[in-house]
Every structure is written in C-alpha cells, then in structure tokens.
Amino acid sequence: MELCLFLQWLFLSSIAFFLGNGEVFYVHPNNNSSQCPNDTTCWDINKYANNDFINNSIYYFLPGIHNLTRNINIEWGSNLTFQGKGKMRGDPHKSVMESPVAIKCIGYVTVTFGNCNNLLLSNLTIKNCGYDVDGSENGYPGLVINASSANLSYMSLQESQWIALWFIDVSDLTVYHSSFYKNVYSIDVLYNYDSPSQSLLEVNECNFTGSFVELFLILDQNVYVDIRITAVHLYDSSYGIYLLSTASLYDLQIDKLVSISCAGTLFYQRQNSAFVMDSDSPSISITDSVISESSSRAFLLNNGKVNISNCTFSNNKDSALGLVNAIVTIFGDNYFINNTGRRGAGINLIITSYIYLSPDAYLSFIDNSAEVTGGAINIDQPEVHYIHGGFVTLCFFQFLDTKNKTYFYFDNNTAGLAGTAVYGGAVDSCLLTEGLFFGRSLFLEASTFVNQPGYSVISSDPLNVCFCNDDNSPNCSIRTMNLSAFPGQKIGFIMAVVGQLKNLTTGAIDITNNNLASSYLIPAANCTMISYIFEPKDINQTDTTLKVTIQNIDVIKSAYETSVASPIINVIVLPCPKGFCLSKKVCSCEYINESVRKFQSCNPTNNSVTKQPGSNLWLNGTSECTISYSSCPFDYCNGNNTFDLSRPNRQCAFNRSGDLCGNCSDNFSLMLGSNRCGECSNAYLALIIPFAMFGIALVFLIVALNLTVTVGTINGLLFFANVIKIYQPLIPHFNAFIILSQFISWINMDFGIETCFYNGMESCGKTGLQFVFTIYLWALILLIILLSKWSMKLTRLMGNNAVPVLCTLLLLSYTKLLRTIFSIFSFDRIYELSNTKDAYTLKHVWSVDGTIDYAHGCHLALFIIGLLVLTFLVLPYTMLLLLFPLWELCRSKCTIGTTYYIKLKPFFDAYAGPYTDSFRFWPGMLLVVRIILAAVVATKAQNEEDTGVAPLGLLVAVVVILLTALHLKVVYKNPKLNALDQFFLICLLITTVVIYVSKNPNDSFGAETAIFSFSFVCFLGIIAYHAYNKEIVKNILKKAKKAAGKKSFTESSIKIDENMSTDEARMKMPTVTSTVFDTSDIYQFREPLLDIKES
C-alpha cells in the first residue's frame, strides 16, 4: 500500500515538473484582474488554492489585498517561489514593515508547506492567519513550513491569533529582514524527529513587536541543529526567546540582539537533559547584545551552558540574568546597569550555577538595587564538596586562566537587607575547580569597589553574632560583656549578625539563660539594640551568664576554618529599683496599681510607670517597695505620662525638680512671668528701673485719661481680666496668646513677660515680690496726695481725681493680692505607700514649692505676711465696699461713727458713683465673687478628677446672674456702661462654655483668641474714648475762659459759706462721677481725703 502511494506521488510529481518547469504565474487581488499581464496565467489566490501548485514555478502576487478564504496545503513541493510585487516599506529595526501585497486570512485558514524543499517566500504581508481554539491551550497556526532549504525574506506576519509562522523539522532555514507584529507566537520552531541529519536555522535582521512570544524553540531531536539569531530587535513583547530542550545536539548563537520593554523574560532557556561540561553539551553564545527594560528577568538560564560576551543589561526588573543549574562563561566587557530585583539585581545564581571568567572578562555592576539581598550578585548554593576531611563550597566564580587581575567592578549598588554588592557564595572560603582552596583575599583582589559604603558589602547567610562599638560598627573581637540588672529588667546591648568576611547580615539569634532560650530577630544588616528581659534562675541568684548564638545555624564550615566562640554576657543580679518589689522572679508594682488613682500601669523591665493621659499625678520611688505620691501643681509637670520611677524629675517641666517639681534644678532660677526655671544672673536686677518707671507711667495714664473706677468705663474690663487670670490654670495655652495674655496680665498687675530677675530666685522670694510692686503703687499715689498739700502744680494736676486714682489702683491690685494670698495659704499632702501598709499622709507641703514643709522656714514668714494682709487690708476693704450702703441706710437712725463715715464716704463714692442708688453694693459684691471664684479654683483644681468642672460650672452660674441683673438696666446710671459690662460678661461666658465643651484643648484655641482679641480691641476703644473726651473738654474750657475773661471762679454759681460744715460743702461741689472732664482748673475744690476736719 505504501509502495503504491509512493509510486503515485512520483508519477504526479514528474508530470507537474515536466508541465511547469520554470513557469511564472500571477496572483491578482480578489475580483481585480486589471493588473494581470497579457498572455499569462493570472488567478486570485483562492482559485490557486483549489488546484495544485506547480513545482519549479514562481508565483508573483500583484499589489493589493488578497483575501484568503480557503486552506492551502502544499505537499512535496519543490523549487517554489512566492513573491510579492513591489518594495517593502519600513525599517525592521524601527517600525513594522508593510508590503504592497497583503494576504489576509478570512475565517479559520491555514497555509501549509509539507515535505517541501527549496521554498522561497518574499515581499509579502500575511495578516490574521492562525487562530486559537476556545477552551484549549492549542490552536491552528497561520503558516506551517516543513521543508529543507527554505528562505523567507522581507516578510511581514501580523496579528495572528495563534502561531504566525511554525517551522517543523526544517533544515537550512533562513528568515531574513522580516518583521512580526502583534502575534500570539511569532515564530515557533519544533525539532521532533531524527531527520534531517543536521539543520541550520537563521533569523537575521528581523524585528518583533508587541507579540506574546516572539521566538519559541522546542528541541527534542537526536540530530545536530545550528541556530543563529543575528541583529534581531524586540520591542514591547510579553516574552522574547524561549528555548526548551531535551536534546543536547544543538548550538545557539545570539548576536547583536536588541531588546526594549519586554514585559516578561527576554531569553528563557531550560535544558531538561543532564549535561556535563564537555564538547558534547549544547553551546549557547550571546554576544554584543543590549537588553533593557525587561520586567521579569531579562535572561533566565536553566540547566545549560552559556557564553556571554560584550553585552549590556540595563533597567531590567526581577534580575537581569538568572541562572539555575547553569554555567556562564564571560568574555569581554559586560555591563549590568540600573537593574532591580528581589535578590541579585544584576545576576542571581541558584543551586549549582557558576560564572567562568575568561582572561579578557570584565563585569561592571553599576547602580543596581535589590529589594532583599545581593544588590549586584546573589548566590544561593547549598551544594558542597567534601575535601580533606571537611566540606567546602565551590566558588561561584571560576578562573579559566589568569587569577591576579580585576574581573569585577562594583559601583553604588544597594540591597534592602544585606550584601549591597554580593550576597552568598562563600567568597572567603570556597574551592576553585583545579582544587585550590583559598582565603578571602583572592576575590577582593579580583574586584574593585566604588561608592559601596557600609558594613554589608559582601555578605551571606548568618555565620556568627558579634557585639558592636558605640558608633554602630561590628566588633567581633569582643566576645564578653559584663552587665548588671535587677530581676525582670529589660537590659540592652547592641549586637549584629555577621556573614562572610564578617560583613553584616540578617538572621535570628538565641540568648540562652540556664538552658532557656529566647529568640530575637535582627531584620536588617545593622547593629541592633537587643532588649532582653532578664529573669534569674532563683531569687537568691547573684550572677549568671547568658550565651548568644545564631538560631538554627546550618552552615558547614571547612576543616581549615578556625572556630569562633559565641559571645557571652555576664550579668550581676541587682535588687529591685525604688518603688518595685520582687514577685515571681521579677520586680513588680502591683501594689501601686491597686491603691493610687490616675495610675495606669508599670513596666519593671525598664523601671517605668505610666500615668493616665492628662493626669496631674506626681510619683516618686523612695525605696524598694515604697513610693510617695501627690498631685502636681499647675504646669509644673510635663505631658510625659511614662517615666522612670527612680528618676521623678523626669516628670517635671521647665527645668524644675524636687518634690512636686517645686524647685528649680541646679544652676537654674525661677523667672518672672511664668513658672519656668532658667539660667539667670544678677544683671537682671537692672529691671528695677523699668519696673519703677512702669508704676509712674501707670499712675500718669490713669490721671491723664481719667481711667478710674469712678467713671465706670473700665469696671467690666477689670472684672473680666481678673476672672480670666484667676482661671488661668484651666485655660489651655494661655501663654500662647502672646500679646493678648500680656494684656490680661498687665491689667492684673503681673509683669506678663517671662524674664529673669536675679540669680538664685526661689519660690519664697518670687512670692514675696508679688507684694512689692503693689505696695510701691500705693505708696506712689499716697505720696502724690501728700505732696499735693505743698505743690499747687501737683494739686492742679490731680484736681478732684486723687481719691478715684487711689481707688482704681486698689481695685487693680486686689485680685493680685487675693491670688498671692491663696497661693501662700495653699498646701498639698504627700502620701507614702508601700506593699505592706495602706497609704498615709507623709507630710504637708506648700503647694507652690513642694520641697518646703508647710508653715516652715521661709514659708512661715510668708504665711504671717499673707495673714496680716488678709486680716487688715483685703477683708476690711471688701467688707467696706459691700456693707457701706447698709451703713448709709442706718445713719438716719444711728449717728455713731460719723467722723469715720465722713472720711470714708469719698472713698466709697469713688466706687459707687457710676451705679444707681439701689446697686451701690455692686462693687463690694463683685469683690466677694472674686474671692469665691479664687477659692474654688485653688481648692478644686488640685483635687477634682475633672479639675475644671466645678469652677467652670460656678462661673457660668455667676455670669448668668450678673447678666440678668444688667439686662434689667438698673445697675448703672448710664445705659452705655451697662452695655459695656454686658459685653465683657458675654465674652467671659463664651470663654467658659468653650473651655467646658472642648474635649481637646486645641479645639478652644481659636475661640479664645477671638474673644481675647475683642476684649483687647474694646480696651483700646476705651482708651481712645477717654483721650478724645479730654481734648473736647480742654477746648470747651478754653472757650469758657475767653468768654468770662479773668473773672474769678469763686464768683460762679457755686456759693461756699465759710460757716458750712465740710460735709455740706462737699455736697455743693461737683462730683467726679458726673463727668469725665478734667478738673485740674478747679483744684481748689478737690476732695481733701487726708486733711478734712469737722467744723
């Protein structure tokens, strides 16, 4: 049967050859025969498909689109030429080539050349030929060639849905100057049979663009195949060249390959057969090629032997060259530039992969970066060789000739964890193939390192652990460290895991204490602080030894490597620190947690305790199992909730120290204007001069502008500023308002600016100074009043304002005296607590300075002064203003004390002048309100859980009551003054509510700034109003003087009888409450507070 078929084929072939020897045929585009030459056979392609193609013939395809709707199957064809008329357009290295002749497959169409020889295809574009099968990994190729001596030139195969060009067992095949565009597989080559005896496959000067796989080679034959790929360019491909082989009889030469933007692996080679390094193994050579911007390993060589010469790998991802059981021989200059990868950005060697260096080899690794290890080269070689009674790893690099020259150049390579240049490979203790075992010097001599800083340039898996120096450099010569720790303490020591050449790497270590190991991970190739919680074996142990080793080390060292002892740490056991007690082999603080409010937790490992956030708790470890604690005064403690219990000063702010942070640290002094301690000198005593000038300026301002309580314009402002200052501990960021806070402080007779005064100023001295400026102002105005008796100019200046000015200064200083007295009288309890008994009061201390016992030392003197001021000044002053209206009502029934009444009436009238008769008690009532508010803030701010709840609630109630009274418009005589007081009370109410509802102190900052700004602007308006009215009055008086001439003022309508009593004369005089005019021109009728005598 087979013989019959063969004879039939031979007969038909001879007839075809005889009939068609050397004939020329033309193929015209579908339904367009206009281009056909005369007297020639000229059909469309589908008609030829119905007939046998004649051997030894040339088929010319005329320009145009040839739609192929039928399969073409040419078997046993010989000497066939298919050529398009016209020239190809485009450069194969820059764009997709196009022929004037385009064969376009319509439907599922395949062109097959089976068992053909001497086949030539040229100047044709073939599109859409080949299709896949839904649901299957296979499909049907577009052009199938099984031939010997086939040549394809100037071809363009495009947009195949499966394989564009499939070669099966071809021999002497050339693809030249052709392009392939957007195919699934551009070229698929399969060698599967034993014939032909040998084959040559050339792909020369072609370009491949945008396909899934450009060149797929499957070599399963037992005959020799020579594959040559020359001057091929690949652009934007998913995968480049794939070589899968079970045979070893082939050579692959890739020369002048250019690849740009390959989405996957550019060259993948997998040799499934075993091979040895001899002449029979396949040879793969890659020369003069440029590979860039591949997204997944530019070259991946699996179980093969490859020569690489003068190639450049740049900007590739996931390693430029991956070797798996592969041997690479390097020739010439090769560059690995700016590649990235997880391990080995330049070259990643896995298992038994090696690099052989020819005498002219030179590898440059520049700016490569690995995410994990091996910025330039990563070696993973678990295989070892037995020699001289030990195990040793083969060097990942091998020399083919000269050893004493430079082969490697490393410049600015980086790695995320370890080995910025090289990771792995045992470069300091490996074996060359000729059996020479060497030390570390040879690899270093063969390499040049530039811009490779740090201690992890050539590293490996962990081999040992070392201590580090203070500059975080490893020091493996230190093998012992001595420490001391209490039970449960977290002790720290800096250690590093080292690999080959004692370069840093990563790994886990075990710290063993009495056969109990604790594991610690060193995640980066750096010297790392190890925090170890020390627990002794028993409570009576006084010392112990800790051993530090690499965890699960599986590194086999050679017989020639000197064993290095593991580092040890000698620990002396200390007693528990202050405040902690020994419990269950660790120092504990459970008794504190059970007894102290606002205490959150403790950590005996570092001797720290943690307070509740926002707590004003102060703690101090006084001895083992004993602490003292109390509440920290306003802003004395910082916001640090966690601190060392044996170092209580760590919870102090502003350079303070001591019990309750009451004193300044050494060489620091208290400063005026805040509770801060600073470095001061006695040169600041020169501030006495500006302080004195400020007092004179204040008196002059009050006199010149008539800014007195008698006028009433500043009464509401004073109450607002006084209450704000009293509530300063509850106002977040008060000092952050800068100018506005200074404005409030100045109204309250505080300096308002943080400054030193003298070196060594402490709490007693600073508190005593609070009285000095107040007394100075009082003395100044009293001196002016006394001098007015002998100086007509001074009398004319003061006019009728002496008493109002004195009363204004008293009211200005009232709140300052009140706050100072409350601070003197304030105290705190310091409690002591131990694990054996409940908390009890250890001592009472002065709240301002917890280092001073209450009513002892300098505080006793301040206490006496404060008591005297309270008894003989503050309380009488308050009671006078509060009860004088009642005295006025009782004078109709009781005339006792008339002398004192007459003397004090001008004083009281200065305060009560702006108010209606029914509310002449208003100034005294506001003084009582100040006392109540100051007392509540002083007592509650230290003891309440929510320190501001009670004071803020009380203030809201007080302000609402005052606003209600002012709303009735019966308090002030002048409605404008009534409205002015309402404005300041509303500002005070808004401030209080904002502070109360703000969960975060920062939330109230904006509102408080706005309110303080409004009040400051209002104060400036009051100043401007007084200055403006003073000018108007001067002009009016000047006009009056001109109209009256030199007529004496005594001839005016005011008639004073010499027989009148002083009280009756005073009733005839114009009161200072009736005008804001300057009274300097009627000085002879001023109020003689100090020289009034009964008639």
Image (cartoon, rainbow, N blue to C red):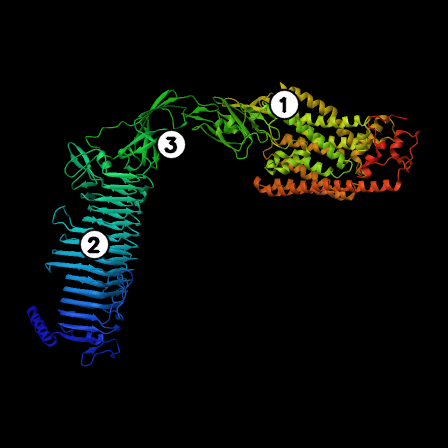
- The residue tagged 1 is 765
Element under disc 2:
strand
Asked if disc 3 and disc 1 are in contact, CB closer than 8 Å, the reply is: no
Q: Position of residue 575 (x, y in %)?
A: 43, 21
Would residue 550 appear left or right of 887 to someone viewing this image?
A: left
Q: Of the numbered discs in the image, which one, if any, rests on residue 255? A: 2
Report the mark closest to the observer, 3 or 1: 1
> Total label count?
3
Gap between marks 3 and 1 measured at Cα: 47 Å
| Residue 545 versus residue 1034 in the image, above or below | above
Query: Do the numbered discs 1 and 2 sit on residues whose CB atoms are within 8 Å?
Result: no
Q: Is residue 687 above or below residue 126?
A: above
**Three-letter code, disc 1:** Gly
User: Residue 213 location, x and y as percent?
Assistant: 26, 58
Disc 3 packing (10 Å; few <14; some 14–19; many ≥20): some
For the residue pair 5 and 752, the one nearer the viewer reads as 752
**Could you tell which of marks 3 and 2 lies nearer the N-terminus?**
2
Q: Is residue 73 above or below residue 921?
A: below
Quadrant (top left/top right/bottom left/bottom right) for the C terminus = top right
Residue at horizontal 89%, vertical 32%? 1065
Residue 718 position by quadrant: top right
